[in-house]
Image: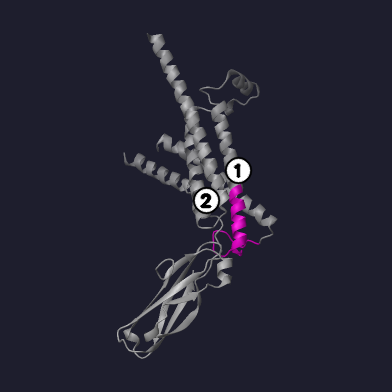
Amino acid sequence: MSSPTLLRLIDEAILPSIILLVAKFIGLVFIGAYLQLSIVGIFSKSVVLTTEQYLTLNSYASFIMVMVYFLAFAFILLRGFKLHESHISPKAMHLMVSQGLLEMVVSSLKLFHQYIIWGLFSLLTAATLWVYAYNGLIFSWVAGTAVLGSVIFQWLIVLDIEHELRLSEIDSGHHLEILE
Amino acid sequence: MIEPFRNFLLGLVFLLLLLLTPLVAVGILSPPSLPSTVLGAVAYEVKIDSLPETYEYTLPQRLTNNNLRPASYRATIVRVEGQNPDQINATLYFEDSNTDTVRLMPGDSATILLKVTSATGAIETYRILYQITAE
């Protein structure tokens, strides 16, 4: 039996991995079709493209990938801010119960593992895109968008964690008052 | 004791592999390869008593325009022809980099410097053959 934390991290890492790969692949297919490019092979040097075509295709497909990833990340954060079991509002809780969506309410344990993985993935994606942009393999605005988005998401994660810490401090203070 | 540790290591490796996904996803489409191209051997005649030390060489537009990523160019001496070729020390280097290689962006031009020194000191004429390679 492996470490429960590790298993949970692996579990949480599968979805963002799939999202990144599928979004990039779909982006390549759609942009390739839109630009009427004939792509012979991927993961190889046999791609029949001029450098300009490659740059356009790779940039826009990566942009789609980043946007899809950020959309999913925003959903995770929205759950963290609004449907976190530690501070969900009674109104939201009532709505979730009445709509049969109680599974949408997320525990701190699950949420913080998700934050680690999704945050790490966004940083790695932004860093990789930055390296590609530096080498002229992708438009720099795509890398810039990824870096900016990633930084904003990290900031939102920190905000939520700090909010959670304040709540736990208030809770522990309340306990002390009762004990006194 | 060993089995939990082994499982932990396996899990760690698996997690690290998953963390490589962004690199794989971004690099899913390989850039078009630009094969190492010899742009041609160039013969340059030098006279020991009046050495021209610089030689302007502008890279072909075909390569500089089609290659949006930075490309490496290398200038190498192929052969020295003349009366005492062993006495001739010829070196090439790009003005910007002070080495025999340079990385250029589209539209850039490069100046190759040719430096020749002779141990004989006599007035002799040599042919310096060099080539430019692009990668």
Separation (CA) of disc 1 from disc 2: 15 Å
The three-letter code of the residue at mark 1 reads Val
Residue A56, magenta (yes or no) = yes
Q: In the rendered view, does A26 fall on the left or right side of B83?
A: right
Residue A117 lies in the magenta stretch = no
Classify 10 Å Cα crowding around label 1: few (below 14), some (14-19), many (20 and above). some
Residue A107, image x and y in percent? Answer: 51, 27
Q: Nearer the viewer, residue B58 or A147?
A: B58
- Tell me the quarter of the picture where residue A68 sits: top right
User: As shown in the figure, which amino acid type bears the numbered disc 2?
Assistant: Leu
Q: Nearer the viewer, residue A70 or A12?
A: A70
Q: How is the image coloured?
A: one colour
User: Judging from the image, what secondary structure is the residue with disc 1 in?
Assistant: helix
Q: Nearer the viewer, mark 1 or mark 2?
A: 2
Please say if the residues under marks 1 and 2 sit with CB atoms less than 8 Å apart: no
Q: Position of residue B20 (x, y in %)?
A: 47, 49
Residue A111 located left or right of residue A62: left
Q: Is residue B105 visible?
A: yes
Q: Quadrant of the C terminus of chain A?
A: top left
Q: In the picture, which quadrant includes the N terminus of chain A?
A: top left
Q: Which residue is mark 1?
A: A68
Looking at the image, the residue that sits furthest to the left is B119
Q: Report the span colored magenta.
A: A38-63
Measured along the vertical axis of the image, is residue A111 above or below residue A132?
above
Q: Quickly name the residue at label 2.
A: A129
Instruction: Identify the residue at image location x=57%, y=26%.
Output: A82
Q: Secondary structure at mark 2?
A: helix
